[in-house]
Image (cartoon, rainbow, N blue to C red):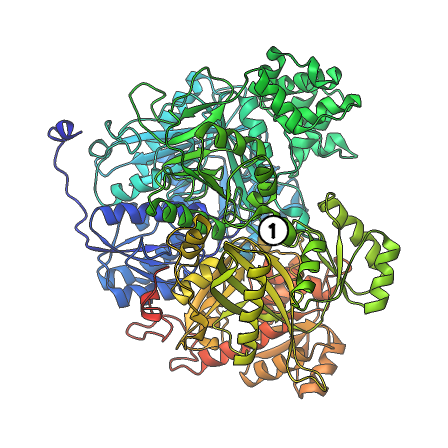
Amino acid sequence: MAEWAKYLPKVERAGVKKVLLVGSGGLSIGQAGEFDYSGSQAIKALRESGIETILINPNIATIQTSHHLASQIYFLPISPDYVAYVLEKERPDGVLLTFGGQSALNVGVKLDEMGVFERLGVKVLGSQPDVLRMCEDRDLFVQALDQINIPVAKSEAVSSVPAALKAAKEIGYPVIVRAAYALGGLGSGFAEDEDELRDLSARSLSLSPQILVEKSLKGWKESEYEVLRDQEDNALICCNMENFDPLGIHTGDSIVVAPSQTLSDDNYHMLRSAALKVIRHLGIVGECNIQYALDPNSRDYRVIEVNPRLSRSSALASKATGYPLAYTAAKLALGHTLPELPNAVTKTTTACFEPALDYIVTKIPKWDLSKFQHVNREVGSSMKSVGEVMAIGRTFEESLQKAIRQVAPNYDGFEAYHAPADLDRALSVPEDTRLFAIAHAMLNEGYDVERLHDLTKIDRFFLYKLDNIVQIHRQLKELGSLSAVDKELMLLAKQRGFSDKQMANLLSAGGSAVKEADVRKHRKALGITPFVKRIDTVAGEYPAHTNYLFTTYNASSHDVEFDEHGTMVLGSGVYRIGSSVEFDWCAVTCARKVREMGHRTIMINYNPETVSTDFDEADRLYFEELSFERVMDIYEMEGSEGVVVSVGGQLPQNIALRLKDTGVNVLGTDPKMIDNAEDRHKFSGILDSIGVDQPEWTEATSVAKAKEFANKVSYPVLVRPSYVLSGAAMNVIWDESTLENHLTAAAEVNTDYPVVITKFIDNAQEIDIDAVAHKGELLIHAVSEHVENAGVHSGDATLVLPPFSLDPNDMARLKTIAQKVAKAFEISGPFNMQVIRKPAGEGEHEAALKVIECNLRASRSFPFVSKVLGVNFIDIATAAIVGEQVPAPVDPMAQQRDYVAIKVPQFSWTRLAGADPFLGVEMASTGEIASFGCDVAEAYWAAMCSQTGFRVPEPRKGVLLGGDVNKPELAQVARRLSDLEFKILVTDSGVQEHLKEAAGVKSTKISFPVKDKRKLREVFDEWDVQFVVNLAKSRAPNLLDQDYVARRNAVDFGLPLINNGPCALLWCEALEYKMKQPGSGGLSGWEEGKLPPEVKSWREWVPESTA
């Protein structure tokens, strides 16, 4: 490289010394962990170039918001106002807008229009605002591509419903509607006729000022190219990908394969040339992706869109090829050129090359739609998935079956997990379970490739590959015994992606029970084990000493020597509701600490959005399944020192006991103790034995026994299964009629462990304890208080740290409980508890503290407590797990602090059409954000404004109130909002009467057309509704329930919704605090020279932080 650099022309760099990077905020559907990865890479690139980095990102769970990356971090909203405040305070020379998803890009364009960059002399690095505007404004985009004769789908940009109907008449139905400046296809959809278009365009225009009506090309192939370009016009294609599903499903909700499998060489090069022509014409500097629709029967194609920023598919392309796109894009934004940058993998060749792949990658989305009532499960042009998995293999069959297992631990591979009543409709109108409907059609209903192709429009190539899996499936089922599986069939099954467990189930179909362990033993006896291959970006053409690995049965030799005997850290797998970027922070922090202690590290994970799957983070990265089979394969090949199972959320915990029983050295807390804590029956027995209080409970072995218990302790009761994450199938039951069907649902979630029923304590306060112990001795703990009362899942709760209402006696008792639990379970490592506090009744001298849950692993609040208290809990936990450099116990809760931090949930209701935005014991949020303040009101204001898409209310306008009149907060909220001069609106005369009697508040009853969304939109506009407060007792019984319609349409129209009593009161307090600030009511937004008190960096709030 040094020799090569002599011949390169000298190019002018962006002369910047201090740069602001705009992050993406809380994880939501369409904008998830991939921006933690791309932002972290960008900061790494800036640091290497000696540039001071300022980061604004309220997502406290991310790796990029840790001290070892950015120089200063602001946990503040990604909004034009707050970014302008930070720019004014920090005065950087440059700003990066393309590493924080759509949020950062929209804010950047707005700040450019406000003239803030020009006024403060800030240089936009990389693609310029005009370029970003051109790609996002559909009219400008179509005009730009017309200039170079690149075909775009026939379309018209409109900004009203009548104009949309007129455009569709000219274009011809079916049409697709897209919203400008929207993320992940938000507000887009297909319309077959005028009625559908009327509803769809009304909804889309409530989310975006402009929509595009274009001819639908449903059924065409969809392909995507990731492109890089530098300021000297060098450009290259990093990766091309193809959707398994035809056009019509958002690429984030499609199964995606890389490199493309069904494009002819001619088509591939035609689209490649077009991509380079487009990026050059638009003037993009850095990275972008271009999506195409391609007619399967001709050379006809259309450009669907160009994203002039890092996107979810950029993270996928980086992991699929080994080419660090975000890192390179950041260097290009600084003025570097592609030829002068080294290939990060080979280290000996230049970055100006197109990666070659000698393997195949399959991405499958992860949906969590079953958690939501009334949700529409169809997948289309608006994204609904919460995460994605990526599997690497050397055949499509191997790669696909691996990916299916990665989506959920209860999937074994391409099996008929979904048997719809109307099969043909399920195949032609895709839902989240279509792949399993295809399996059902092939395995059980005898559908052939042609029939499936006609119904699904999926390319025959992929369907024939699925048929290869089906053939082995049938063969194994017919054999019916393990001894009949010879070496040839075993190898073929493994090469086509069958797992040991899947084979055991198929061989058991004949009646003889075959276990996974039997198949493993037989396979090893036949000498069949996987091979480890490298991802080297050059398909073996140049020598590369990369540590980026995968396993395959389609090989004949290993690419590595197994002489490092590293410590294995098991990652968290796919992002889903309940397990997200916070566990990636835990896994990465743990791996870094183990390395710091002088041990070699091995990371196993398969999530392309994460920092943990960046090959720089561990000595060896296995992009692999987290199943028992694969972890054992790697453990045995590597001769590993030990395995860490307590930093990756629930997945590693599920296999911990089996690993130990098979002879694996599981580091930290004994898996037998993990089992004691996960199994409700054992757990409750241990708490009784150490004198720690808990709500009354029983094991529900029959419905009769459950009813008897419920009548004894009185309703409400809580039904909860063992070994689950994010409260799956947990429910509060208020009466006997609903008890029975909830019991069967809970039993289905985890059939191997008993369902437990506990007394539910209504209106009690909930407290979280995050702690670390070593050999049963407590080393450190944090106590956070929930704003919501018990009954809201802790992942959806608003957490306050330090707590604001607990007295010193309560704090001391909570610490004692943590010490007792640590001792009883002999904990070495992290743990987390939820405790209920019930105020002292008559004759009682102190509040009751009852433990309701304990997890012997890191929890989702570990990054939050670490960063707020300024002590890295995972560093301490890692020392305890490994048993080296264990620090002396400390008590950060004894310290007085002059600040408070509040963590609030990030929901994605807007995406989940029809879902009821109501909170219960099963988790619904997709992410979290946190902000600091000098008091609770200040911190809550900043945290609420940090929610993606949050609209700051305008003073003295309308607020829609509703819900259960028995909730005391309803009248209190009305009184406070009325005092702040908001106009109180109601839809129900009972509520109107109640507000008048209980609080003396005059409200206006408005007409509320529950069946007509368009008329409802007009009502919201007419009364100037700014936000909705709806305090219902339970979920809606049906879709015409007024409270449901109010909640649902608040989120559909992009308005803030507050659906919890204590939170509503806190929101009133925050509004009051803000409106009393100087300026026009305090809600007016950015004014030059006026910094609000909450605009402080993390170091200013927590000067001593090591997190």
Q: Is residue 859 visible?
A: yes
Query: Can you give x and y, in whole percent of width and height, for residue 955 in the image?
Result: 50, 77
Which is nearer the eye, 568 or 1031? 568
Locate residue 441, reporting x and y percent: 73, 25
| Nearer-the-camera pick, 980 or 1070 | 1070
Is residue 942 found left or right of 45 in the rendered image?
A: right
At label 1, the amino acid type is Met
Residue 504, image x, y percentages: 68, 25
Is 87 on the left or on the right of 506, as rendered? Answer: left
Q: Residue at x 71, y 45 (%)?
A: 750
Compared to residue 542, the image places residue 921 above or below, namely below
**Above or below: residue 476 compared with residue 693:** above
| Side (left or right) of 497 relative to 16 | right
Q: Residues within 10 Å of mark 1 (few under 14, many from 20)?
A: some
Q: Residue visible at 28% across and 58% down? A: 71
Q: Of 449 and 981, which appears nearest the observer?
A: 449
Q: Considering depth in this image, is 81 or 130 the residue closer to the camera?
A: 81
Q: Secondary structure at mark 1?
A: helix
- Whether residue 796 appears in this view of the structure is no
Q: For the point 40% across and 27% down, which residue is it?
A: 562
| Residue labelled with disc 1 | 673
Q: Quarter of the image for the N terminus: give it.
A: top left
